Image (spheres, grey):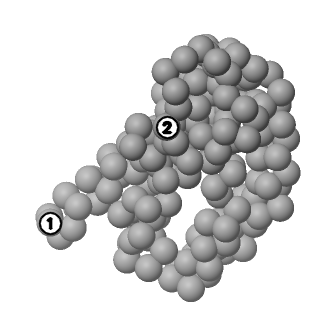
């Protein structure tokens, strides 16, 4: 993976610092740079486009079928989200005023809860992923979650592009 720090081809576990660095490097794969979010944050989505429901069956299945620590590792997208949540709230308040305060409750609660969740999850992952294999599975789980989020937005964005061409 191009954004992941180089890891030796060995079975030796990473140091705790190198493991955390490899997990944090996944921030470059997070979906905040996707065209959908860029359009949303600049007010270029319609009311109908904001109402698109996200189907995340792949992620739910992943969390149900993989070892619990991999599901926790996948949740580490929370490491990248707090500042982005404020950006989304600002975008909604500025561009989508028809969304009432209740519609922003989830985002607003994530401002304080996401950092706590991320700290807790990172502690669990670094504590329980002690072998090289476990660490690589945790990094792969986080990469998978980023891929799911990005792919989901690809599908939505593609649909939106089709709608704008038909309008």
Q: In the picture, which quadrant includes the C terminus?
A: bottom left
Left or right of residue 52: residue 128: right
Residue 141, horizontal then vertical, whole percent: 57, 29
* Separation of residues labelled 2 and 1 (CA atoms): 43 Å
Q: Residue at x 42, y 70 (%)?
A: 38
Residue sitting farthest toward the left: 166
| Residue that numbered label 2 is attached to | 6
User: Does residue 64 appear left or right of residue 167 in this picture?
Assistant: right
87 vs 48: above or below: below
Q: Sequence-wise, which precedes: disc 2 or disc 1?
A: 2
The picture places residue 36, in percent across and down from the top left corner, at 39, 62
Q: Residues within 10 Å of mark 2 (few under 14, many from 20)?
A: few
Q: Is residue 16 visible?
A: yes
The residue where tag 1 is placed is 165
Q: Quadrant of residue 121 in the image?
A: top right
27 or 146, nearer to the observer: 27
Q: Residues within 10 Å of mark 1 (few under 14, many from 20)?
A: few
Tag count in the figure? 2
Between 142 and 12, the one lying in front of the other is 12
The answer to which image quadrant residue 48 occupies is: bottom left
Q: Secondary structure at mark 2?
A: loop
Q: Residue at x 33, y 49 (%)?
A: 154
- Give the percent coordinates (x, y) of residue 143: 51, 36
- Extreme-bottom residue of the structure: 94
Report the residue at 41% width, 37% height from top. 1
Judged from the image, the secondary structure of the residue bearing numbered disc 1 is helix
- Compare residues 154 and 2 and report the one nearer the observer: 2
- Residue 57 seen anywhere in this rendered image of the structure: no
Residue placed most toward the observer, 8 or 80 = 8
Q: Is residue 95 left or right of residue 13?
A: left
Q: Residue at x 49, y 37 (%)?
A: 6
């Amino acid at each position: 993976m191009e954004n992941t720090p180089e890891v030796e081809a060995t079975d030796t576990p990473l140091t705790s610092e190198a493991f955390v660095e490899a997990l944090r490097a996944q921030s470059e794969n997070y979906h905040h740079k996707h065209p959908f979010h860029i359009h949303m944050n600049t007010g270029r989505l319609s009311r109908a486009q904001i109402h698109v429901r996200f189907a995340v069956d792949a992620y739910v299945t992943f969390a149900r079928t993989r070892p619990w620590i991999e599901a926790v590792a996948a949740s580490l997208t929370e490491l990248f989200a707090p500042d982005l949540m404020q950006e989304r709230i600002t975008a909604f308040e500025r561009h989508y005023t028809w969304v009432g305060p209740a519609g922003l409750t989830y985002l607003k609660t994530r401002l304080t809860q996401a950092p706590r969740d991320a700290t807790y999850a990172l502690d669990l992952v670094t504590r329980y992923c002690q072998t090289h294999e476990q660490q690589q599975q945790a990094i792969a789980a986080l990469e998978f979650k980023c891929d799911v989020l990005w792919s989901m937005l690809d599908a939505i964005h593609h649909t939106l592009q089709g709608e704008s061409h038909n309008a």
